[in-house]
Amino acid sequence: ELQLVESGGGLVQPGGSLRLSCAASGFPFSQFDMSWVRQTPGKGLEWVSGIGGSGLSTFYADSVKGRFRISRDNSKNTLYLQMSSLRADDTAVYYCARGLLALDFWGQGTLATVSS
Amino acid sequence: DIVVTQSPDSLAVSLGERATINCKSSQSVLSDGNYKNHLAWYQQKPGQPPKLLIYWASIRESGVPDRFSGSGSGTDFTLTISSLQAEDVAVYYCQQYYNTRAFGQGTKVEIK
């Protein structure tokens, strides 16, 4: 059974850091590109970052470039998103999703709240 | 960057009737390389993550009922639900993946 399980969300102060993880199972993780997408009530769905299967190619939305870093550990079937210099407008539910073009499977999401 | 705009923001349709959602991109998402439209449609029900329905503008994802269909090319696209069922109540999003990635603002579909 396909599974993507996000973790690592929580409350952090502005300027702080947070590391999200996404544990994958039920498919050959290393053979698939992966993405992070966030969702807020006000701004809807926003693609944040993507990574190729090998981890060598990474891509970022302009809104997070230089602050967020995507990575993966194929030996652990896990995707990561290191978020730094966090701002209030980074508050969102963060989903990991399989793919880099159309996203064919999504996790349940983890909530990251940036507030003092 | 390509901006994607959906219309309407919401619509109410009677059970068994047709629902039509439009998606317009600010630039063409038709690739010269593979002659495909880089556009997908998703369904999101309350409390759930989005679910892929359609990719390459018109290819139905495995397991998606055939009452869902996608059409269009270039900058103008449509998602059609041919006969609305109660379980189709959801928010629907289009997404372009031609240039970076961008989602439309969503269209809420309800039962009239």
Image: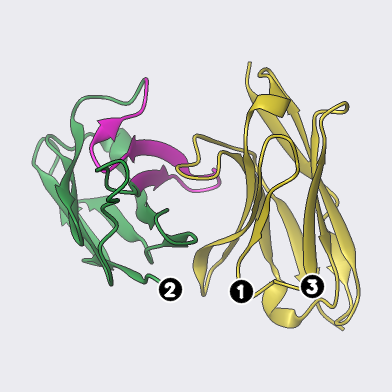
Sequence order check: which comes first, mark 3 or mark 1? 1
Name the residue tied to disc 3: A67
Give the residues drawn in magenta, as a range. Answer: B40-62
Find residue A90 and report its horizontal and vertical position in percent: 70, 73
Residue at (63, 15) in percent of width and height: A1
Mark 2 secondary-structure assignment: loop
Give the chain of mark 1.
A
Amino acid type assigned to the residue bearing label 3 in the image? Arg
According to the colouring, which chain is yellow?
A
Q: Give residue B53's quadrant in the image.
A: top left
Q: Give residue A65's quadrant in the image.
A: bottom right
Mark 3 secondary-structure assignment: loop
Circles 1 and 2 on the same subunit: no
Name the residue tied to disc 1: A62
According to the colouring, which chain is green?
B
Cα gap from disc 1 to disc 2, whole angstroms: 10 Å
Mark 1 secondary-structure assignment: loop
| Image height of B5 relative to B16, above or below | below
Name the residue tied to disc 2: B1
Amino acid type assigned to the residue bearing label 2 in the image? Asp
Find residue A78 and report its horizontal and vertical position in percent: 81, 35
